[in-house]
Image (spheres, rainbow, N blue to C red):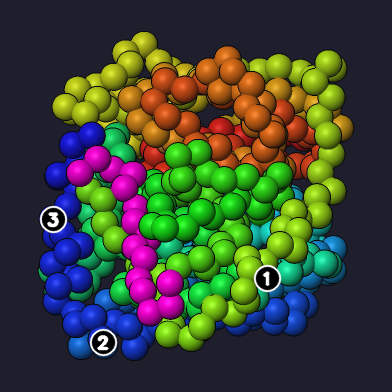
Amino acid sequence: MNMKWNYPLSRRSFLLAGTGAAIAASMRPWPTRAEGQNEVRLTAAPAQALLIAPDRPETAVWAYNGTVPGPVLRLRQGEPSRLLVENRLDEETTVHWHGIRLPNGMDGVPGLTQPPIRPGETFAYEFAPPDAGTFWYHPHADGLVQLGRGLAGPLIVEEREPVAVDRDVLWFLSDWRLTRDGKIAGGFGNMMDAGMSGRVGNMVTLNGRVSDAEPVRAGERIRLRLVNGALARMMALGFEGHRPVIIAIDGQPCEPQEAVGGRLLLGPAMRIDVVLDMQGEPGRRYAVTDDFYDGLAYTLTQLRYSQEPPLRAHPADAPIALPPNPLPEPDLTSAERHELTLQGGMMGGGMMKGMGGMDGMAMPGMNGGAVWAINGMSMTGDGDAHMEPALTFKRGQSVVLTLSNQTAWWHPMHVHGHSFRVLSRNGESVPHRQWQDTVLMQPKDTVEVAFVADNPGDWMLHCHVADHQMSGLMTVFRVA
Ligand code: C2O
Ligand code: CU
Ligand code: CU
């Protein structure tokens, strides 16, 4: 894939500008085993962030509680929580608790599930998260701009009995498109981004900073929670000299398994929890690379081993399987079946693809910027588009959706209010039938997912590449 046009500034030029020592000193520890919080206050407001290195200019961002990413929220599974969101931006906002199966009124979609939070207002979100795992939160109003300017943060729902590890570590990955002087580049929602890969940036941060290295100790066992909080960037992470074992995807536990080809594939909004045994040598460094885009591989960070002797003589062998979450099992024999066909977008060379003959579709930039469609319908923007739900399910109905990607682009398709089992890909059944809230689709992929429509309300289903969502790759279904 040729993505040159997307890179006004190479990441390397930033990395070379900061000295290794300065960057290393900037690493921030994250709390482990913190007590779950039952009441949290989040304030969305403009702030300054040091994304690159202390000797580089700060970047004007929009942030929750002044930091990017926002604070790590830790809730307890099944316990009622109250999250107060205050809007100190100049525009309306909401917060969406991505992946949490919560009551519809708490889902944070403006016009669909709640009135937007106007500047100066506060909204109280209240829910008891049913599932333990790694989730995240972000705005669902003007999401392309608000997420792209920094509004996002991690949300951990603690298991009642967590797996035994030496450290619980979170890497919240964000992708920024910065100008040469370190400002967030404008041009949100331009036609090239919308019709192609979305707003892929030129600098990736780990917990809000460009990371030179992350400290580890030989012999220790880490639970590493990876969150792709990017607007559009797909990631394929490889750990030199290490074998991460996946224990959860999108917060939902799975049978512990090594990644296919050793790379962890993370579309925007996806999470993967792995157990990493630090089997490297004291004093050495091992690269963590992202090579999703051909020719654009980069080193995300390095695992930097301390000089200390290994923490234990033999690798840890405690069980690492997580307890399952209480998800309702779809009944495939009685399931209703529906197809959702993803259409539109441009070809790599800028040619229109499949743009003719679809209802409500036109050239990008016209018709409210529709570039994409689902079953011929383009729901654009980031909230209520005054469209009838495309599908209505009786509460408790098992549903199989066949998602078929007729476009030339990748799409992480995300469902609200539910998680689905991924049954098959291109006609082949998928081992483990993993629960996910976001399924990454390659160009031309057909994927079957199944779930029980048990959560009443109007729910979004959309591509999580923000530009794609805003320009038509979105629909709504109703559970009544
Ligand atoms: Cu992360 Cu509509 O969601
Ligand atoms: Cu969501
Ligand atoms: Cu997409």
Q: Nearer the viewer, residue 395 or 320?
A: 320
Q: Give the number of the mark in front: 2 or 3.
A: 2
* Visible residue check, residue 399: yes
Q: Mostly what secondary structure, the magenta segment? A: loop
Compared with residue 137, is residue 344 higher up or lower down, i.e. above or below? above
Which quadrant of the figure has residue 433? top right
Distance from disc 2 to disc 3, alpha carbons, whole Å, reads 25 Å
Compared with residue 201, is residue 49 higher up or lower down, i.e. above or below? below
Of the two numbered discs 1 and 2 on the same chain, state the one appearing first in sequence.
2
Residue 348 location (% of width, % of height): 21, 29
Task: Read off the magenta span.
Answer: 281-295
Q: Nearer the viewer, residue 306 or 162?
A: 306
* Visible residue check, residue 208: no
**Residue at figure coordinates x 48%, y 86% from the top left:** 308
Mark 1 highlights which residue? 165
Mark 3 highlights which residue? 8
Q: Give the number of the mark in front: 1 or 2.
A: 1
